[in-house]
Amino acid sequence: MTKRAGMEIAFAAAEAVALCKPDVVAAYPITPNTHIPEHLSDIVADGRIDAEFICVESEHSALSACCGASATGARVFTATSSQGLLFMGEVMPIVSAMRLPVVMAIGNRALSGPINIWNDHSDIMSQRDMGWISIFASNGQEVVDMVIQAFKIAEHREVLLPLNVNLDGFQLTHVVEPILFPDQSEVDRFLPEYEPYATLHPDKVLSMGTLGMPEIFTEAMKAKDVALINSKKVIMEVWEEWEKLFGRKYEPIQGYKTEGADVVLLTMGSMDETAEVAIDELRERKISAGLLKLKLWRPFPIEELRNAVKGAKVLAVMDRAVSCGGAAGPVCAEIKAALYGEPNPPAIVNYVIGLGGRDVTVDDFITIAEKAAQAEKEKPKEAYEIYGVRGS
Amino acid sequence: MAKKKWPETWQEFNLGGMVFSPGNASEYHTGSWRDQRPVLDASKCIKCGLCYIFCPEGCISQDADGYFVADLDYCKGCGICAHECWPGAITMVEEG
Amino acid sequence: MSSIVENFDLFAPRLVDKEEYFSVGHRACQGCGEALGIRLMCKALGKDTVIINATGCMEVISSLYPTTAWRLPWIHVAFPNSASAGSGVEAGLKVLRRKGRIPDRDVKTVSIGGDGGTVDIGIQALSGAMERRHDMLYVCYDNEAYMNTGIQRSGATPFGASTTTEPAGSASFGKKAWKKNVPEIMVAHNLPYVATACPSYPIDFMNKVKKARKIKGPSYIHCLSVCPTGWRLPPNLTIKAGRLAVETGVFPLYEVEDGKYRITIKMPEKLRPIEDYLKIQGRFRHLSADEIKMIQERVAQEYNKLLDKVNNLHSWPDLKQ
């Protein structure tokens, strides 16, 4: 029986992980995702799940321990944010190269300089090329659903790749929302026991993490790239199954009132919901505006994006991170690359907003939509605008 | 010397770069590295096994008569066995 | 010569397990002391072992895709994390066995790393793993520099040695700091078993590995690995150099069980002079008589500190906390 509970989303994420019966959790605390490992360790301490919770001494060790545990055939989970993610950084591409299905929750937080514990996407954007499946949640329900889906996707024999679920730090992690939890038997039916491809055990001896000479490195990268690209098929199947079981639909890009929209905003993460309110108001004022919520970041849904923007005159892409000195923000650069060469693409404007936890309001989105509408006639002067910065 | 074979296509690259054949490094004959090789004088050998223990390659083993002999496919000619053989049964001889 | 005849270890080699878990065909240098150490360690561990290997000489020379020299389950992740990846392996094996998903028998987790991956970049992970009391043996293969990348100085490089990043020159005599004493750091972690070893004393080394393997908890072995390439000596002197390191007191062979120190091989009445050890190695060739005297004094002092501990410290019962 599905259970409805009002819960802080970080706690809910931990409950979702517990429903998946992980074998090993290795995590190091960092604001704002700390409540996830804390609550999980409570669950383990109360004997609600049988798992080894390793209180590692750093994030580098957290992901390394997850590697080692996953290699023995255990289902593993970890969580981190910002600097912690960078500290694991060395191990990130190794996990995907070794095809270990580690699931990680990232409470998105600004990368330091100055040190800032609040929400933006600079942490995950620094990990674009690491070969992980990357999914973004807009609200608490999505966090819980995506965490449970994550294990099924990552461990699928045709995927076998690590996966990170992104939830905005504080904006989501520390917010209390009503959430529907599937019960244990439903999750057990949806998510079978992990059947690893190969494990570290003397009964079947193998070597993992071997040295790749120039003669084979290109082939190794191609194999990983193809695996990540092809994982979209499994992601779509899992989402289809989820909709059948629980009635909640997930797509790589979800449109909101985009039919016939001239100006389309594109957002990721919790600001999706704020933007929806803005779109409602714009539509009230008879302004032709719509919203695209990008949920699947890696593998990037190129075809879905191209279809989603057809007919739009202007696409305003929100980036919650700056690529300093770049030609566009990280998300916008990806969008432009995907749309390059398409017939009649929309004019694209790029706004960098909400850095370091700065609030993004409904009014902000309305202003952005109005400004973006100008872009159809007048090309913006800068490659991207850091919206709302004080000083000219 | 046995030649190494690289996988032809990316599809042949083992998942995750795993190697499923334990000890297949032996396909590569490191014996081609050496410039001197150990020669055993069986009359002095007391079959103590010290050379076998001290060989970093592990390429010394007992023949049918119990004498410890180096496998020349792999012997790198380091000379440890000759140096440690206290009855002096092993001498290093220049190759070629 | 006479010391070898007295040492009855001589006849034990024939009784050692003939199985080679570290195959021929690996790409270590001629005369590599570390490869020998690995080979002997694996014999002492047996087949029910999982090896976690830090980046370094041994990992690189043994695992060139698509080949592997390992006949034991083996994983390499990165440089600083042999102990933390090992923590994960240990936890994984533990929980999977408990849940009945793998056979119900002991499989030992053994993390290995060079001095780079243990003493310097790997010290955090090692300390954390030991503090958490994972049932894990850690073996440090100490060739006293970052050999795999070209003989750069590490915390384990001995005083006065010339390395490529702290070389001897007209304005420097090489490494200015004394070797970091990691076995003592491990003793301070209150491990049930800590030992130093050297493949030049193969039976002593293998017995220590066997002993450590039996411990239900963390254990640590520091293995001096002579490197002819980096220490600049002929490859056939690998075993002799290790013996001299022990006989001069530079690297005494001891073990610490629950706080009780014991020297594990019969030491000569009087330590051999340090010159015997230094003069066969090119990395010490530049040292002046005064510098050698400094080293001799400090080696003697360190050895006396150890004897002090051997004679005066006793073991404390394991209160199981």
Image (cartoon, coloured by chain):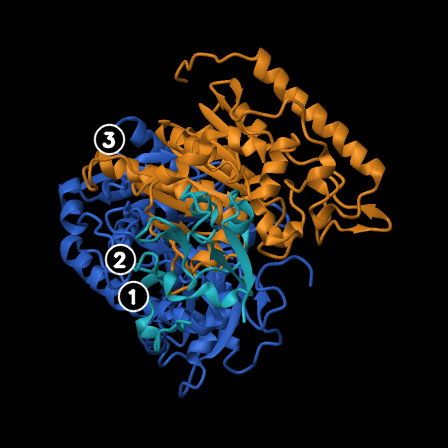
Q: According to the colouring, which chain is cyan?
A: B
Question: Is there CB contact under 8 Å for labels 3 and 2?
Answer: no
Instruction: Report which colour depicts chain A.
Output: blue
Provide the secondary structure element on which disc 3 rests.
Answer: loop
Q: Residue furthest bottom?
A: A343
Percent x, y for residue C226?
58, 45
- Quadrant holding the N terminus of chain A: top left
Q: According to the colouring, which chain is orange?
A: C
- The residue that disc 2 covers is A153
Residue A54 appears in the picture as rendered: yes
State the residue in front, C254 or C79.
C254
Q: Amino acid at mark 1?
A: Ser
The residue drawn where x is 19% and y is 56% is A242
Q: Is residue A370 above or below residue B23?
A: below
Question: Distance from label 1 to label 3 (Cα)?
Answer: 32 Å
Q: Chain of mark 3?
A: A
- The residue that disc 1 covers is A231
Percent x, y for residue C25?
42, 60
Q: Is residue B78 above or below residue A26?
A: below
- The residue that disc 3 covers is A48
Q: Amino acid at mark 2?
A: Ile
State the residue in front, C169 or A22.
C169
Badge 2 and badge 1 both on one subunit: yes
Label 1 or label 3, whichever comes before in sequence order: 3
